Amino acid sequence: MGKAERTRKQSARERIAAQQAAARRAQRRRALAIAVGSVGLVVVIVAVLVVFALNRSSGRQSGSARLPVSTVRALTSVPASTLAAVGAGSVLSYNPRPLRAVSDQPLTSGGKPEMLYIGAEFCPYCAAMRWSMAVALSRFGRFGPLTGIHSSATDYAPNTPTLTFYRVRYASRYLVFTPVENESVTHAALQPLTGQQQAIWLKYTSGSYPFIDIGGRYVATAPMFDPKILAGLTWSQVAADLHDPASPVARAALGAANYLTAAICSVTGGSPASVCQAAPIPALRRGL
């Protein structure tokens, strides 16, 4: 074999080796790209699923948020002196019959009196009453984390600032609080009623919100103040106004809270005394 022939064959082998090396490098690059793309796709899918899971169950509007600790503290620790200064507040000028005495079978749960609330997140009147319920119930127990929402943007008193009782945690030695947010802000089904809850609700209303049954002895079938009082306020501003007994918010929401407290004291046998014997609760209880 001549030298030229040997040179050509060597060059051919080198070209083939170079092509094979290039092919292997290209294959590795494609494999890496596929792997990276697959990871990216998984990340995107997981992110979509998380967002979907967070929003699918409640149909909640994007304006919902966990309330700051300072706001929750202000809401759930209104001083007894402020509540006493407000008394009945402006409630009777808006609703002359805020609570109705009934003679149902006692409503209880786990051996304790039960307070049943049926409402909806879109409902502006529920939005108003949740502030009062939170204040009153905080005198008998403790809430877990609370979430702020706004009522429907297309209803009366649009975008009323409020909180939701959807899946809220509440613990008390004196009573059981059973909240049912029946519909979301978008009117989607949220929490179904039991047969017993449905029967109680329809006994006293035509299926309207809000509805409150306290121990089977008192019911509230209408709001106790106008939600327009809360218009334009943030959650923290509402909570702060609750500490000023001269503010329209305090006179409305705390007046309603005092009526609810009086009814709760009637079903807990006056316990705890530190709450049920404090002004203005004894006087309101006599008027129930």
Image: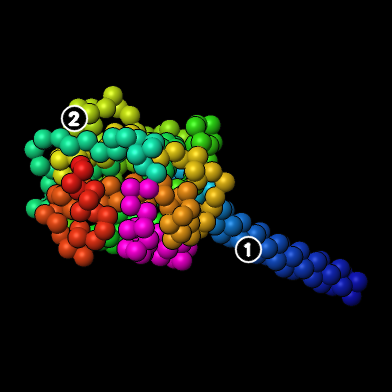
Amino acid type at image mark 2: Ala
Q: Which mark is residue 268?
A: none
Magenta span dominant secondary structure: helix
| Quadrant in the picture for the C terminus | top left
Residue 169, picture quadrant: bottom left
How far apart are labels 2 and 1 at the CA level?
63 Å
The answer to whether mark 2 and mark 1 are in CB contact below 8 A is no
What is the number of the mark on residue 32?
A: 1
Would you identify the image quadrant in which residue 269 lies? bottom left
**What mark, if any, has residue 199 been given in the picture?**
2
Q: Residue at x 40, y 65 (%)?
A: 73
Q: Is residue 56 visible?
A: no
Locate residue 157, reporting x and y percent. 51, 36
Q: Earlier in the sequence, mark 2 or mark 1?
A: 1
Vertical comparison of 219 with 15: above or below: above
Residue at position x 40%, y 40% in the image: 225
Magenta span of residues: 66-89
Q: Residue at x 20, y 48 (%)?
A: 285
